[in-house]
Image (cartoon, helix red, strand yellow):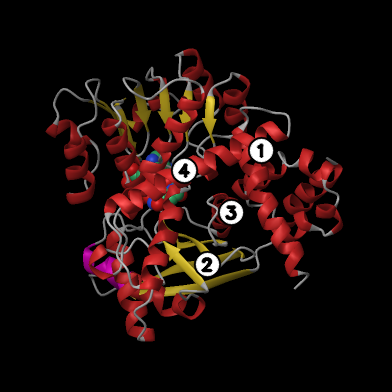
Amino acid sequence: MEYVQSVVDFLKNKYPSDPVFHQAIQEVLGTLQPLLAREPKYAANKILERITEPERIISFRVEWVDDKGEIQVNRGYRVQYNSALGPYKGGLRFHPSVNLGILKFLGFEQIFKNSLTGLAIGGAKGGSDFDPKGKSDKEVMRFCQAFMNELYRHIGATIDVPAGDIGVGGREIGYLYGQYKKLTRLFDGVLTGKNPLFGGSLARKEATGFGVVYFAQNMMQSAGNSLEGKTCVVSGAGNVAIYCVDKLHQLGAKPVTVSDSRGMIHHASGINLEALQQVKEVERAPLSRYAELCPDAKYTPASEYPAGRNAIWSVPCDAAFPCATQNELNLEDAKTLISNGCRCVSEGANMPATLDAAHAFIEAGVLYGPAKAANAGGVATSQLEMAQNASMQKWTFATVDNQLKQIMANIHKAADETAKEFGQPGNLLMGANIAGFRKVADAMIEQGVC
Ligand code: NDP
C-alpha cells in the first residue's frame, strides 16, 4: 500500500489542479494492492510511476473564423498515454469544460479499458474546449478542419486512431476525416466512427450503448436474473444514452428516463426511442422538446433539481445506466438508488459514479459494472472498424453486433474471474482494474525501459 500511496501523493503534488485525474489514479491504483503484493516485479520495474505518466502530450492552438467573420481561438490536445499493447486509441471530446486534467483522466482510464477488450490497442484521449452547441454546420466544419490542420501530424492508421466522445459524433468525424484526407492524400482508417459510406463500421454508432446493456445482461445472468421486464433509469441523451435505451427496449426492459445538461425526462410508460432520436439526432434540440412530442412525459428542468443532486437517480428503478458524464452520480444518489431497490448499475459514461458511490454499490451487493468494463464496447467496435479498413472489407451489422456481444461477455468473464482470483468475488471494479493493468504492465516489462 505504501508503494501505491507514494505514487498517488507524488502525482497530487506534481499536478495539484487536476482533481479528476487524481480521482482516476486513485480509482485504479487503489484496487491493485493484492496484485502488487503478489508480484514484486511491478514495483521493481517502477510500473506505477511509468504507467501514470503519458508517453506524449500534444497541445496546440486552433484558430478559425465564425459565421460573423470573427476570429475564434480554442485549445486542442491529444494525450498519447500508452502504446504497450498497440496503436494509441481513444476518443476526441469537444466541450467547453475540456482541459488537460480531464483528458489525462480519460486517457488513463482508456489504457485499461482497451486492454480489457483483448484487442491490440493502446490508450489515448484528446479534444478541445470548443463547444459545438449553438454553432452552425459550417462553423463546426471550419473548426474541425482547423483542429485537424495540426492533429494530422500526430496520428495515423497504425500510430494513433481517434474516435468520437462528448460533442464529437458522425458529423464531426466526417469533417475531421475529410480534412485528414485532404492533407495526407490517404484514405485509410485513421478515425473510427466514420459514416459507413466511407469506411465506417455498421453498428459502431450503436456499440457503446448496446455494449453497456450487454454488460448489464451478463451481470444479471451471473446472478440468475435478467433485464426483461425491469424498470431502468438512463441519464444522458447523447450517442451512448440513445442506443442504451434502444437495446433495453429490444431486451424487454423499460427505460423510463433520459437527461441532458438542461433537464430530465421521466416517461413512466417507457422512453419513446423515435421521439428521442428526432429531438437529439435530427433537431439537435433540448430535451424539453421531447415533452412536446410526448405529452404524457414529465420534463423537469435542472434548475429544479435538489441542490448538489441529480434528480434522475431518485426515480425508482431496478437498474441504472449513467450515460452522460463524469461524477454525475454521488454517494447520496447511490444511497437513494440502493434504498429504492436498484440492483444493477452499468456505467456508459466514463467515471460517472464518484469513488464513494462506487464503493457503496459494491458494499450493498449491487451488481456494479465499472465504466472501463461496461462501456468498452465502443472502442472494441472501433477496433473492428480498423480491422475492416485494413482488410478493405465491410462486415454486416449482425457480424459486428455478434462480435460486440462476445467481447462484452469476455470482458465480464475476465473481470469476474479476476475478482474471484484476488479474493473479492463480485467486485468487478477490482477485477476489471487488475485484469486490464496486468496485461499492459507485463507488455511494458517485456518491451524494456524505452
Ligand atoms: P454526447 O455528446 O453524444 O452526449 C452527451 C450527453 O450527456 C448529452 O445528453 C449531454 O447533454 C449530457 N451531458 C454532457 N455533459 C453534461 C453535464 N455536465 N451535465 C449533464 N449532462 C451532461 O456524448 P456521448 O454519448 O458520446 O458520451 C457520453 C459519455 O459516454 C461520456 O462520458 C463519454 O466519455 C462516454 N463514452 C462515450 C463513448 C462513445 O462511443 N461515444 C465510448 C465510451 C464512453 P447536453 O447535450 O445538454 O450537453
Separation of residues labelled 1 and 4 (CA atoms): 15 Å
Give the mark toward the camera: 2 or 3: 3
Specify few, some or many for label 4: CA neighbours under 10 Å numbering under 14, 14-19, or 20 or more.
many
Separation of residues labelled 2 and 3 (CA atoms): 19 Å
Residue 175: which quarter of the image?
A: bottom left
Q: Is residue 133 above or below residue 179?
A: above
Residue under the image location 40 percent in, 79 percent down:
149
Q: Is residue 140 magenta?
A: yes
User: Is residue 65 at least partly visible in the picture?
Assistant: no
Separation of residues labelled 2 and 1 (CA atoms): 32 Å
- Residue type at mark 1? Thr
| Place of residue 291 in the rendered image (x, y in percent of width and height, measured from the top left) | 18, 31
Pointer 2: what residue? Answer: 78
- Residue type at mark 3? Ser
Residue 418: mark in rendering: 1
Pointer 3: what residue? Answer: 115
Specify few, some or many for label 1: CA neighbours under 10 Å numbering under 14, 14-19, or 20 or more.
many
Q: Provide the residue span drawn in magenta.
A: 136-143
Front residue of this view, candidates 107 and 127: 107
Separation of residues labelled 4 and 3 (CA atoms): 13 Å
Front residue of this view, candidates 129 and 21: 21
Of marks 2 and 1, which one's residue comes earlier in the chain? 2
Of marks 2 and 4, which one's residue comes earlier in the chain? 2
Pointer 4: what residue? Answer: 408
Do labels 1 and 4 touch, CB within 8 Å?
Answer: no
Of marks 2 and 3, which one's residue comes earlier in the chain? 2
| Place of residue 289 in the rendered image (x, y in percent of width and height, measured from the top left) | 18, 38
Quarter of the N terminus within the rendering: top right
Residue under the image location 73 percent in, 42 percent down:
32
Q: Secondary structure at mark 1?
A: helix
Q: Is residue 268 above or below residue 352?
A: above
